[in-house]
Amino acid sequence: MSDFFLKALNVKKSYRTSSEKIDVLKGLDFRLQRGEIVSIIGESGSGKSTLLHILGGMDLPDDGSVLIDGVDITSLDLKERSRFRNENIGFVFQFHYLLPEFTVMENLKIPLMIGKRHSRGEMEEICIEILNLVGLFEKRNRKPDELSGGQQQLLAIGRAMVNSPRLLLMDEPTGNLDEETSKRVMEKLFKILEELEITTVIVTHNISLARRTEKIYRLSGGNINLEKY
Ligand SMILES: Nc1ncnc2c1ncn2[C@@H]1O[C@H](COP(=O)(O)OP(=O)(O)OP(=O)(O)O)[C@@H](O)[C@H]1O
Ligand SMILES: [Mg+2]
């Protein structure tokens, strides 16, 4: 028995379009210890988002498996996988997918309501804590399109945190933030992640953000390797 919290083994993924087949991930292996915070860099189109979606059980590999805390999420059916995701994984998407017709507060509450593990009062409390954390308490009754791009990103980060995930997967979490705000948000976030021992993968083109993590991996040619720096 190894003590790796996350294990991706021999992960393969190709996309077929009418004219071609693109092999994006070519039998990739990736392991994370519990509580590890790492980043993944790589050229646009190298497969970072594809990998992150597979690690988070949002997409299935063509071959290989992903184990999270001993659970092979690639062998779960759709319903079990969604449930596992809701209970264990926080995801910040490259494009944040906030729900435009709902308020900031409601956007935060939705993953909690899906989880059905908290009373109304508890949900309220958790959301307020998160709102304070990401600095959006004043905006709690606004709609996402009334927020700046950076504030929307902060909300997406907050939403990924409400269910106290054990694994946090972030795809360009600071893509819309200016350098200063990005630094401030990530410093805050790193503190929480370390305190709560949340295993975290950050995909980013921002090299100074990547350098803040314990390890930097590079995705290239369908495989992943530790970047030396
Ligand atoms: N649903 C899809 N159908 C067909 N091809 C796809 C699909 N999704 C991704 N691809 C292709 O797979 C490759 C990897 O895409 P992916 O989005 O994972 O790259 P990325 O590393 O996240 O890039 P970026 O840094 O620009 O976000 C690209 O060549 C892309 O065109
Ligand atoms: Mg991407």
Image: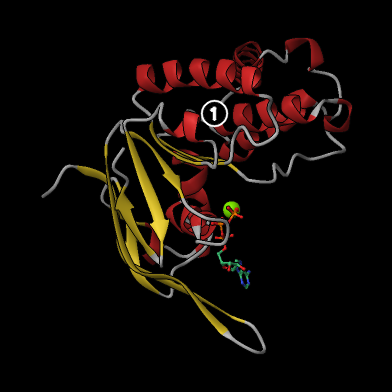
Q: Amino acid at mark 1?
A: Met
> Quick one: label 1, few (<14), some, or many (20+) residues within 10 Å?
many
Q: Badge 1 is on which residue? A: 161
Residue at 44% across, 34% down: 210
Where's residue 29, x and y in %? Answer: 28, 60
Render colour scheme:
secondary structure
Residue at 41% across, 61% down: 220
Residue 80, can we see it?
no
Rendered position, 126 above or below 198: above
Horizontal side, residue 142 vs residue 52: left or right? right
Q: Nearer the viewer, residue 12 or 105?
A: 12
Horizontal side, residue 24 vs residue 224: left or right? right
Q: Nearer the viewer, residue 114 or 225?
A: 225
Where's residue 8, x and y in %? Answer: 32, 57
Q: Residue furthest left?
A: 1
Where's residue 149, x and y in %? Answer: 78, 31
Residue at 57% across, 56% down: 44
Where's residue 104, x and y in %? Answer: 77, 25
Q: Nearer the viewer, residue 167 or 109?
A: 167
Q: Which picture quadrant has residue 129?
A: top right
